Image: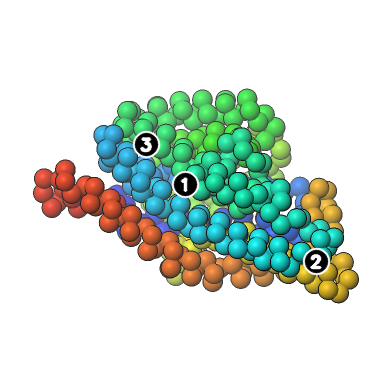
Amino acid sequence: MRGREGSERFEALDAGRGVCALAVAFFHMPLAHPWQQQAWFPNLQFCVDVFFVLSGFVLLHAYGDRLATGRQVLRFGLMRFGRLWPLHAATLGLLVLIEGVRFLALSHHAGAPGATPPFGPEHRPVEIVTHLLFLQNFRTFGEYSWNFPSWSIAVEFWASLVLAAIVMAAGPRRRLVFAGLAGASALALWWVSPRTLFVIQNFGIVRCLFDLFLGCLAYTLRDALRLQRRLATPAEILALLALPALVLLSSPGPLGYGASLAFAAAIALFSHQGGAVSDLARARGPQRLGRWSFSIYLLHLPMIQVFVTAVHAVEARTGLSLTTVLGHEHLVDLGSGAANLAAAAALVALTVPLAALTHRVIERPSLAWFKRVDAGLAAPTARTPAAVAAMAPR
């Protein structure tokens, strides 16, 4: 994707995506570490809203000028499907395989502490169909069906099609349209979820649309945050401090909706990549995390399933108690808060090289294949080679 300012990508934003993917993976780690009981810990779910806002921003940047006809919208939908579905389907297949292993491992130890029945609730075979159709978030089987973080992938796919149709009808720079739709989505979100921004099941798409429209609005206003170097660095530092403060200090309630506004402003600021923080974000390590972020986001749940299955097997063989109930959750307890915290961090770290592998063997080849298909669809209507090049996904 070529930026308006000549850069190949918004590298600073890619790095932020990687950090958020790690944070979401850590949030989902089922260990009884001390942070589980902290009031701020559920606010790590804000990272999903960062993903949504960033998607609206980047999609309008990449495709805004290329969504003028129904055919272009259909091609856009094909590319979004090609970006999201192959890795989603592959991780779902991996989870089905793990569930089969659980069936074999637990068949003689059905009473293992904390172990749920294989292919039982949340892992029923029929639910696989809804996942493959990106329908798992629409009044189906609950929030925690199979690879439950993929709820956001499903709603983003459908919401991005809505966004493409709006851009086709209104144009990519109609900021009043995006502002109005963001406001209407905020009201709808408050209506269905007045207590929290973190709605998932059934109405997660409303949350996604709210954030996507904010991202689009931020893109139309990004020039207002084009700062000189001497101002860009302190502004980026301030944003870098403000965003974790939101996670630490935000309390439950509709005021949490304002966090997405802050995310939109920060994304617009960092898109110019004008300060010292952006320079650090464009280093090799953060960039790799950004490239692998989608795989980290989807792959950490299979990692959790393998870990929990192994814990239950150890419990069954040794008689040790390695699980506990905290609130309504069954969590792994390795004997101390420090050990549980270290284990959670280690599982996140182990996810990263596996994500690098799936990015290389699944994400990149599948997206390249869909780009070739898209180029074939574009060729019959293009009048010149230059027109074909202009339409090819960047």
* Residue at the spot 11% in from the left edge and 45% down from the top edge: 383
Q: Amino acid at mark 1?
A: Leu
* Rendered location of residue 28, percent (x, y): 67, 55
182 to the left or right of 94:
left
Mark 2 vs mark 3, CA separation in Å:
52 Å
* Residue at the spot 39% in from the left edge and 52% down from the top edge: 82
* Residue at the spot 46% in from the left edge and 28% down from the top edge: 181
Which residue position is annotated with label 1?
Answer: 54
* Residue at the spot 47% in from the left edge and 47% down from the top edge: 54
Which residue position is annotated with label 3?
Answer: 164
Q: Residues within 10 Å of mark 1 (few under 14, many from 20)?
A: many
- Please tell me the numbered disc located at residue 108: 2
181 to the left or right of 242:
left
Mark 1 vs mark 3, CA separation in Å:
15 Å
For marks 1 and 3, the one nearer the N-term is: 1
* Rendered location of residue 46, percent (x, y): 61, 46
Identify the secondary structure beneath mark 2: loop
| Residue 157 in view | yes
* Rendered location of residue 391, percent (x, y): 23, 48
277 to the left or right of 392:
right
Q: Are marks 1 and 3 in contact (CB under 8 Å)?
A: no
In this rendering, the label closer to the viewer, 1 or 3: 3
| Residue 331 in view | no
Q: Residues within 10 Å of mark 2 (few under 14, many from 20)?
A: few
Q: Amino acid at mark 2?
A: His
